[in-house]
Amino acid sequence: MSRWSRRRFLGTSAAALCAGCTGSDEPAVLSGSSRELAETPTIPPPGPGLLPFGQPIDVGSIDDGRDAADGSPLFVAEARAWLVAVDPADVEALLADLDDRLHDGLRVGLLALSQRCPHLGCRVPFCESSGWFECPCHGSRYTLHGEHRAGPGPRGMDAHPILIDADRVLVDAGTVIDGPALGSVVVDRPAAGPHCVEPAER
Ligand code: FES
């Protein structure tokens, strides 16, 4: 199987994503084939002994990475992160606003977002119908680039630097960069379709 095969990175149902969630304010998770959350693998939430990761994770060549993440983000299990292919039209705005440590990745059209929701740490899946990341625990919604748009999340999704070594893409999963501040709008693009979850009250 190819290193970039999507099947390798996908596993359990969205219902299993709420590890570590507390409280009763869970959102309704919409159902239906067009609204199903992308699946993520069964991995325990990060905690003592599991993080930080060691060396940056080599996830393939630049071209392979962009191809694999094109259309829908690719879940990289080893990095516990989503690899996003950035539209060339959005690169300039992201370079102007996001942390310098994300620039090497952006210059080759890639962004690595942590799977951990910045609210309470649930694993955030990708909602195929909206084209956003949507947390099933309390309904926070994040754009393709991880900007917060709804729900109790305190900021956008955190990111990891992407290092480029020749034509190889390495995700530095041990370095976590806080997501964009609440209310910031770097790339203003509406959801592509129906959302997968409804936000809980803040
Ligand atoms: S953990 Fe609460 S919205 Fe994601």
Image: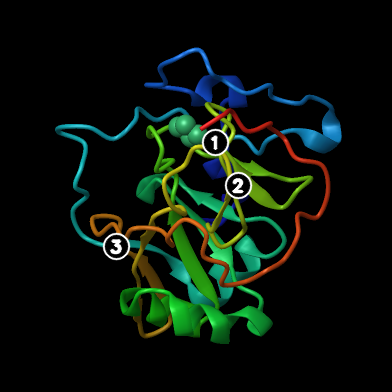
For the point 51% across and 65% down, the residue is: 184
Q: Amino acid at mark 1?
A: Thr
| Residue 17 picture location, percent across and down | 51, 26
Q: Which label is found at residue 133?
A: 2
| Residue 99 picture location, percent across and down | 35, 74
Q: Is residue 190 left or right of residue 6?
A: right
Give the structural element (helix, strand or loop) at label 2.
strand
Pointer 2 or 1: first along the chain: 1
For the point 38% across and 34% down, the residue is: 121
Q: Nearer the viewer, mark 2 or mark 3?
A: 2
| Residue 95 picture location, percent across and down | 47, 83
Q: Amino acid at mark 2?
A: Phe
Instruction: Tell whether circle 3 marks a residue whose Cβ is less than 8 angstroms from ligand 1.
Output: no
Pointer 2 or 3: first along the chain: 2
Where residue 168 sits, quadrant-wise, is bottom left
**Colouring scheme applied when the structure was drawn:** rainbow
Q: Around disc 1, counting alpha carbons within 10 Å, would you say few (fewer than 14), some (14 to 19), or many (20 or more)?
A: many
Give the structural element (helix, strand or loop) at label 3.
loop
Q: CA distance from mark 3 to mark 1?
A: 20 Å
Q: Which label is found at residue 172?
A: 3
Q: Which label is found at residue 40?
A: 1
